[in-house]
């Protein structure tokens, strides 16, 4: 990158009121999209103007001069400004947006809608002509002041000779204050022709709130193209709207960016994403998103992962997007087996719990081998034995490993114990471990009271979790013994065996249910989960089953 070879020397400068207003209205000065919205109150704006009248420094405006055209906020208040003239460099405000916007709306007397949806009239800022230099000169509340001593800033700057007739005792002060506004030198620091990652790094470092820009915010700015009607923020929102219809609305923007990057560059590190060319990004967007949607469809259909909340890693969509970008059809035969083996090894070994960017980049080579139907070698073996599931199975929805086992349960398309109807699985149900849709088959309250010798962690375990509907858990099962509530369902559900099987639970007589034998039930369920994992892997001599 250029920034590895050059140091971007900033250049101090200044501009007066007329120059500032002209540059805004001509479209030369823009606010980049990654800047937050204008949030200063009218009182804060009045304080800024008071400092200017007293000649106090108000800080520098840091300007990024560049030929890049980014997504920018084109409206300040209710006023629209033209595009930057063709051939001119755009001057993006990296620091000082709140101050600059305050100056403009106050000196022009604009009306704007604040974050609460209320209109704020910035023409209601006044100067107390009777105030001394060490007192507050600029006001927003004129109660208690003589109206003959009060003049609005808009009137002070724009009224002609009549203003002297209206304020005969303050002609000298009016001239002084008008000149103060018009001649005040607003300090600027220009950073010229720096690439966007340098500009956003500068913004991040000087941002008073300390909020670092996300990679997505940077790429929204970098890839914006008005002529091609490409706005990454809007494109992502459109994608999420579409995914929300199928229960995958929790997919992060970083996952989408990584998917684009691996398809274009076989690399999804932040450094590489920032190097992606705008033209290629826009040109290939639709193709990548089509592949991304194919990956989501594959997760839903073949792996039967109904919602994104239990997807162990969003990151898994990245290599699968790369696969479908290079292979338009569904995988079959050897490719299908190799992909499934890769998928579950990533989950069992919690591959993307750290350093996911570099691991994803490494895994693109694995997907290339799968596309060529070559057997993969994995340095790390997997352990899918019941003993391993027992030791790692403490129930927590934040664990990728547990989410993987929930995917196994969801794959069975669990049915209601009451009537054998399919249980609806929804993201909003499954966000927290205390959700009523996560049912402890042997209820925790029952176990604490009746089998206190069983450790709590063995009760709050994935092997004791079933996915049920809300009604069943809250009103029917509650804290009763499995023998009681399952016994009741046997009388009403003629196909209870099928219902239990859909939860990887065996016959009530032999699985410990009828005599409330928790450890028999627990161990049989561990065995069932273990077998399900074995069926999904291409096991080697180093793997433990």
Image: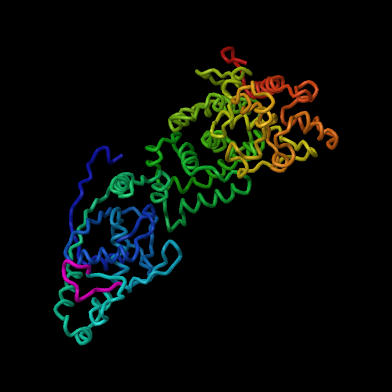
Q: Does 233 sit above or below residue 103? A: above
Magenta span dominant secondary structure: loop
- Does the segment drawn in magenta span residue 128? yes
Q: Does 61 sit above or below residue 350? A: below
Q: Residue furthest front?
A: 449
For residue 147, which quarter of the picture?
Answer: bottom left
Which residue is depicted at the point 38% across and 65% down?
A: 75
Q: Nearer the viewer, residue 340 or 527?
A: 527
Residue 86 in picture, x, y percent from top left: 32, 61
For residue 536, which quarter of the picture?
Answer: top right
* Badge count: 0
Relative horizontal placement of residue 402, taking residue 496 as reference (left or right)? left
Residue 77 in picture, x, y percent from top left: 38, 67
Q: Does 309 sit above or below residue 457? A: below
Q: Quadrant of the C terminus?
A: top right
- Does the segment drawn in magenta span residue 261? no
For residue 534, which quarter of the picture?
Answer: top right
Relative horizontal placement of residue 364, taking residue 9 as reference (left or right)? right
Relative horizontal placement of residue 330, taking residue 256 as reference (left or right)? right
Q: Nearer the viewer, residue 42 or 534?
A: 42
Residue 73 in picture, x, y percent from top left: 38, 60
Residue 216 in picture, x, y percent from top left: 43, 45
Give the magenta range: 125-136
């Amino acid at each position: 990158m250029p920034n590895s070879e050059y140091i971007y020397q900033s250049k101090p400068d200044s501009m007066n009121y007329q120059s500032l207003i002209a540059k805004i209205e001509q479209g030369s000065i823009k606010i980049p999209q990654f800047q937050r919205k204008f949030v200063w109150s009218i009182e804060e704006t009045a304080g800024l103007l008071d400092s200017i009248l007293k000649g106090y420094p108000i800080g520098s405006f840091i300007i990024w001069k560049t030929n890049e055209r980014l997504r920018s906020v084109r409206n300040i208040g209710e006023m629209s400004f033209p595009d930057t003239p063709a051939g001119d460099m755009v001057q993006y405000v990296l620091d000082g947006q709140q101050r600059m916007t305050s100056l403009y709306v106050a000196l022009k007397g604009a009306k704007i809608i604040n974050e609460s949806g209320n209109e704020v009239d910035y023409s209601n800022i006044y100067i107390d002509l009777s105030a001394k230099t060490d007192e507050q000169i600029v006001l927003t509340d004129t109660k208690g002041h003589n109206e003959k001593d009060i003049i609005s800033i808009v009137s002070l700057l724009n009224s002609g000779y009549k203003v002297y007739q209206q304020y005969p005792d303050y002609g000298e002060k009016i001239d002084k204050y008008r000149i103060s506004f018009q001649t005040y030198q607003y300090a600027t620091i220009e950073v010229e022709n720096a690439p966007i990652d340098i500009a956003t790094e500068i913004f991040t470092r000087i941002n008073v709130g300390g909020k670092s820009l996300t990679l997505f915010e940077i790429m929204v700015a970098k890839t914006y193209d008005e002529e091609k009607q490409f706005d990454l923020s809007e494109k992502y929102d459109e994608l999420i709207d579409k995914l929300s219809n199928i229960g995958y609305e929790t997919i992060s923007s970083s996952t989408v960016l990584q998917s684009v990057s691996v398809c274009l560059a076989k690399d999804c590190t932040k450094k590489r994403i920032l190097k992606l060319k705008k033209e290629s990004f826009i040109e290939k967007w639709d193709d990548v998103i089509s592949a991304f949607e194919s990956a989501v469809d594959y997760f839903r259909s073949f792996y039967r992962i109904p919602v994104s909340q239990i997807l162990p890693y969003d990151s898994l969509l990245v290599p699968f997007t790369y696969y479908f970008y290079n292979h338009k059809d569904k995988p079959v035969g050897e490719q299908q087996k190799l992909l499934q083996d890769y998928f579950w090894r990533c989950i069992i070994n919690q591959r993307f719990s750290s350093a996911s960017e570099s691991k994803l980049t490494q895994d693109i080579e694995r997907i290339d081998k799968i596309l060529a139907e070559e057997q993969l070698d994995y340095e790390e073996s997997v352990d899918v034995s019941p003993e391993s599931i027992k030791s790692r199975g403490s129930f927590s929805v934040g664990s990728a490993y547990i989410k993987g086992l929930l995917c196994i349960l969801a794959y069975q398309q669990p049915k209601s114990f009451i009537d054998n109807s399919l249980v609806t699985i929804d993201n909003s149900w499954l966000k927290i471990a205390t959700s009523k849709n996560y049912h402890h088959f042997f209820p925790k309250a029952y176990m604490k009271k009746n089998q206190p010798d069983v450790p709590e962690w063995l009760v709050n375990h994935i092997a004791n979790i079933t996915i049920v509907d809300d009604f069943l858990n809250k009103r029917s099962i509650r804290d009763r013994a499995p023998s009681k509530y399952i016994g009741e369902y046997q009388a009403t559900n003629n196909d209870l065996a099928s219902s239990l099987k859909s939860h990887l639970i065996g016959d009530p007589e032999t699985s410990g249910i009828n005599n409330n034998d928790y450890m028999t039930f627990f161990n049989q369920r561990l065995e069932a989960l273990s077998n399900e994992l074995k069926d999904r892997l291409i096991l080697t001599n180093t793997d433990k089953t």
